[in-house]
Amino acid sequence: MNAQPVAETQPEKDVRSLHADGHKIDPGEIVIGVIIGRTSEFFDFFVYAIASVIVFPKLVFPYVDALTGTLYSFAIFALAFMARPVGTLIFMTVDRLYGRGAKLTTALFLLGGSTAAIAFLPGYETIGHYSALLLALFRMGQGVALGGTWDGLASLLALNAPEDKRGWYAMIPQLGAPLGLIVSSLLFAFFITQLPAADFLDWGWRYPFFVAFAINVVALFARLRIVVTPEYAELFESRELQPAPVGETLRAEGRIVAIGAFAPLASFAMFHMVTVFPLSWVFLFTTESPTRFLVIEAIAAAIGVIAIIVSGQLADRIGRRTLLGATAAAIATFSGFAPQMLDAGESGEIMFMLMGFVLLGLSFGQASGALSSSFSPRHRYTGSALTSDLAWLFGAGFAPLVALLLSSQFGLISSGAYLLSGAAGTLLALWLNRELANRIE
């Protein structure tokens, strides 16, 4: 049993006061909390990702050419994914000692603080190489914080879903990704359009990072509103969604963690191949306006929202394992020809993005939390968090760096190699453990 918190955080007290009259949360509010929480995380993610293409190479690495600067920026981009498991280790301890509310409050303020700190980042012209060191530090802060934002709500949602609606409920948390991309893309497009280039690079790009902090505060209260209430605390306990030591979880459930990390590789690799990487290619190797492409991304992401919703319906009809395998095969096919569309002008870019987001939505909609029910009750909460961390690290963390490096050296077709490896990883994981995979039907 968890130790009693030493003291409630002020946000927890404020949220508890909302329920002092005995008001009970409608079950649908857990859905709202999950979507708001995931959207805020992905908004932070995409604000940094967009800046890593159009801002940081010029601000932090002006002493190298644009391609090299972007590769350096993508290397720092990957640090968050490497730091995320460390954050899980730290914040699972906080959860056990002080409770889930304290964990969420600390993690989200660290995430918002690290993101807001980037808004004050001095450039190379001001502090030299210390600019890159600070950027790396803040990026790792984001990663550590993301490891602590795991609140178990997605697992709770899946475990309480009706038998014939598991696919539908599984897709709900995934809606946060395209929603976060839509908001961040349009926000950057607005500032790029409204400001002269010099002003944008001087101070305009910093505003989305301030917005990210404000969104995190809203997300914190939306999630605390659920997790600190007695009825949901009881649900967490009845489902045994309590933190267990990371080492113990890996020793007991390492096989499930590994399968869970590799099963969604196709969709996680696809995630960056249609979001971060194409923006970098268009920005570096074409004369297209970044504003126009950001708008294309936002429109394609809206199509992705629809595809994620459709994935829930399909999964409940044909099974989640079948859908994951079918979309992995489709992504493997896509990797063999689609990247070349980015060199086919505006129409090619639009086709690449629309096709990519349809496939991404169908696969990503069922990619996370598929194995939650396969963990033993004691290790379900921690095991699900570790699975998510490792899947993002292996599937997405290095995707922009590898794809841009390969395509710049060997042509766009070679960038599909990373995507193909992700699809192969998913198919292999599903094939190697059919017994486990059958349990996600």
Image (cartoon, rainbow, N blue to C red):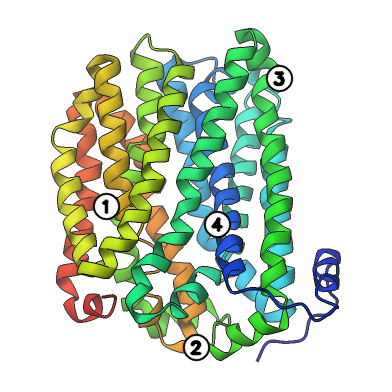
Amino acid type, callout 2: Arg
Which residue shows up at 45% across the image and 72% down it? Answer: 384
Mark 4, other Cα within 10 Å: few <14 / some 14–19 / many ≥20: many
Q: Is residue 172 above or below residue 93?
A: above
**Eyeballing the image, is 71 above or below 382?**
above
Q: Which residue is mark 4?
A: 35
Mark 3 burial class by Cα count in 10 Å: few <14, some 14-19, many 20+ = few
Disc 2 to disc 1, how far (Cα)? 29 Å
Are the residues flagged by discs 2 and 1 in contact, CB closer than 8 Å? Answer: no
Residue carrying label 3: 203
Question: Viewer-proximal residue, 254 or 412?
Answer: 412
- Mark 3 vs mark 4, foreground winner is 4
* Label whose residue precedes the other's in the sequence (2 or 3): 3
How far across and how far down the image is residue 421, in percent?
21, 49
Q: Secondary structure at mark 4?
A: helix
* Marked residue nearer the N-terminal end (2 or 1): 1
407 left or right of 180 in image: left
On the image, the x and y values in percent for residue 191 come to: 62, 20
Type of amino acid under label 4: Ile
The vertical placement of 387 against 271, above or below, is below
| Residue closer to the observer: 77 or 33 | 33
C-alpha separation, residue under disc 3 versus residue under disc 4? 30 Å
At which x and y percent is residue 119?
70, 32
Q: Nearer the viewer, mark 2 or mark 4?
A: 4
Q: Amino acid at mark 3?
A: Trp
